[in-house]
């Protein structure tokens, strides 16, 4: 296959030209159950009527004006995110990596403005993934994405995910912030225990440093609450980075923060040409209309618990194929005994899509709108997949 597209992705030879709900249709008419959701992006599935209508209406009115002017939908989205979180402010950008960059810069500026210029380093977790910019690969905990890009940004110290002793030992007078994914996605669906999140909060307070969560993948309803950190009670961060599900497929990222954390983010401190434009803001508001609508998050929670039970039952019946079920809400992982790539291609033979992650894990990231019919079909495809692979094992 030759293509003028830069070959930075190992793509499957599949072309889709239509999506509807939890299904994607190929150009040659095949239908796939989509448990990838564009890697946790299509939270409301494909072609959700409310998103389509909103985007079409907005497209006929106004696309882009820049942040030189007030953008009413941006103000509305910020107010809604703030009203439903710990935060006082929201900054809008276009991707997860940018949402991380904003948080990383914010922590530095916070201490710089207080005259504590020595505080600029961030403690991050092994196995984490925060994006592909130079700062975010430096913050990330996987060697694979860093290779060939030295010198990296020397501002990040890594400790094992979930280990408070090592984290506390790594804090120095130069530490400005702790940056953690409450649930690591690319790292293999590693769930941060609720005690761990609470200990992060307490430790950040004890040392007077900022707590920055990366909820790019696990946020916006994926765990059955708007934000994953909410499950832990008193564990709210000072800064949170969001993207993926927030736009439901339209590129949008956000960085929320308390007024104190954002105290240095004055006019001119940070910016973006495209971030927060009327198209993105209308769409993200439409996503929130649904996600914050009556009973939606309860539906996610109920669906997720039922799916969890069925997956753990499947694991018990096919221990030579699946070692463990991991995750929270509709952010689930099957730690495989067999090769996870082989698992995914066998699933595709059974008309179901999922995405791999580190640690030989298959990630199941269905649209949050999935119901019983999709769960039933997913379990049938997974059963067929396990049967084939168990026979080969
Ligand atoms: N943070 C997390 C937890 C992610 O999962 C990702 C992307 O997978 C990112 C950051 C980077 O987001 P983006 O690819 O939109 O820059």
Image (cartoon, helix red, strand yellow):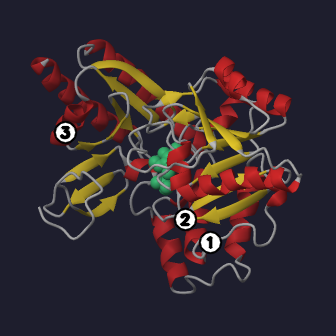
Residue 229 placement (x, y as % from top left)? 66, 36
Residue 88 placement (x, y as % from top left)? 81, 55
* Label 1 vs label 3, nearer the camera: 1
Q: Residues within 10 Å of mark 1 (few under 14, many from 20)?
A: few
Q: State the separation of the CA atoms marked 3 and 2.
A: 31 Å
Residue at left offset 59%, top offset 42%: 297
Q: State the separation of the CA atoms marked 2 and 1.
A: 9 Å
Left or right: 254, with 140 as reference point: right
Q: Nearer the viewer, residue 371 or 168?
A: 168
Left or right: 381, with 166 as reference point: left
Q: Element at badge 3?
A: helix
Left or right: 64, with 339 as reference point: right
* Label 2 vs label 1, nearer the camera: 1
**Contact (CB < 8 A) between labels 1 and 3?**
no
Q: Is residue 373 above or below residue 312?
A: below
**Contact (CB < 8 A) between labels 2 and 1?**
yes
Q: Element at badge 2?
A: loop
Instruction: Give the number of the disc on residue 345.
Output: 3
Q: Is the residue indicated by label 3 positioned so its CB lies within 8 Å of ligand 1?
A: no
Residue at left offset 59%, top offset 44%: 215
Which quarter of the image is occupied by the N terminus? bottom left
User: Which residue does the numbered mark 2 point to in the structure image?
Assistant: 94
User: Which residue does the numbered mark 1 point to in the structure image?
Assistant: 272
Q: Is the residue indicated by label 1 positioned so its CB lies within 8 Å of ligand 1?
A: no
Q: Residue furthest front?
A: 151
Q: Nearer the viewer, residue 219 or 226?
A: 219
* Label 3 vs label 2, nearer the camera: 2
Q: Nearer the viewer, residue 275 or 25?
A: 275
């Amino acid at each position: 296959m030759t293509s003028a597209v830069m070959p930075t992705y190992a793509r499957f030879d599949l072309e889709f030209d239509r999506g509807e709900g939890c299904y994607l249709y190929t150009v040659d008419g095949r239908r796939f159950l989509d448990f990838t959701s564009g890697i946790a992006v299509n939270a409301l599935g494909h072609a959700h009527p409310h998103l389509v209508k909103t985007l079409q209406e907005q497209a006929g009115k106004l696309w882009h004006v820049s942040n030189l002017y007030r953008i009413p939908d941006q103000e509305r989205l910020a107010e809604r995110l703030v009203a439903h979180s710990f935060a006082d402010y929201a900054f809008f950008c276009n991707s997860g990596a940018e949402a991380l960059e904003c948080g990383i810069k914010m922590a530095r500026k916070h201490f710089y403005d207080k005259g504590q210029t020595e505080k600029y380093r961030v403690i991050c977790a092994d196995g984490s993934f925060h994006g592909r910019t130079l700062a975010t690969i430096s913050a990330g905990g996987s060697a694979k994405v860093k290779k060939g890009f030295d010198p990296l940004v020397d501002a990040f110290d890594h400790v094992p995910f979930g280990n408070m002793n090592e984290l506390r030992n790594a804090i120095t007078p130069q530490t400005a912030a702790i940056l953690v994914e409450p649930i690591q996605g690319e790292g293999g669906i590693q769930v941060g225990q609720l005690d761990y999140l609470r200990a992060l909060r307490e430790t950040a307070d004890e040392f007077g440093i900022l707590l920055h969560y990366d909820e790019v993948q696990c946020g916006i309803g994926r765990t059955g609450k708007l934000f994953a950190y909410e499950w832990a009670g008193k564990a709210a961060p000072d800064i949170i980075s969001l993207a993926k599900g927030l736009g439901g497929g339209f590129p949008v990222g956000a960085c929320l923060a308390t007024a104190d954390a954002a105290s240095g983010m004055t006019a001119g401190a940070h910016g973006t040409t495209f971030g927060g434009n009327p198209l993105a803001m209308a769409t993200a508001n439409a996503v929130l209309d649904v996600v914050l609508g009556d009973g939606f998050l309860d539906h996610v929670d109920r669906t997720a618990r039922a799916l969890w039970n069925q997956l753990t039952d499947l694991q018990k019946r096919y221990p030579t194929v699946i070692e463990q079920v991991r995750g929270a809400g509709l952010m689930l992982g099957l730690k495989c005994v067999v090769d996870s790539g082989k698992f995914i291609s066998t699933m595709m033979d059974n008309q179901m899509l999922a995405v791999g992650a580190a640690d030989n894990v298959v990630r199941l990231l269905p649209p949050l709108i999935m119901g019983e019919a999709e769960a039933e079909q997913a379990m049938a495809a997974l059963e067929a997949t396990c049967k084939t692979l168990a026979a080969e094992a």
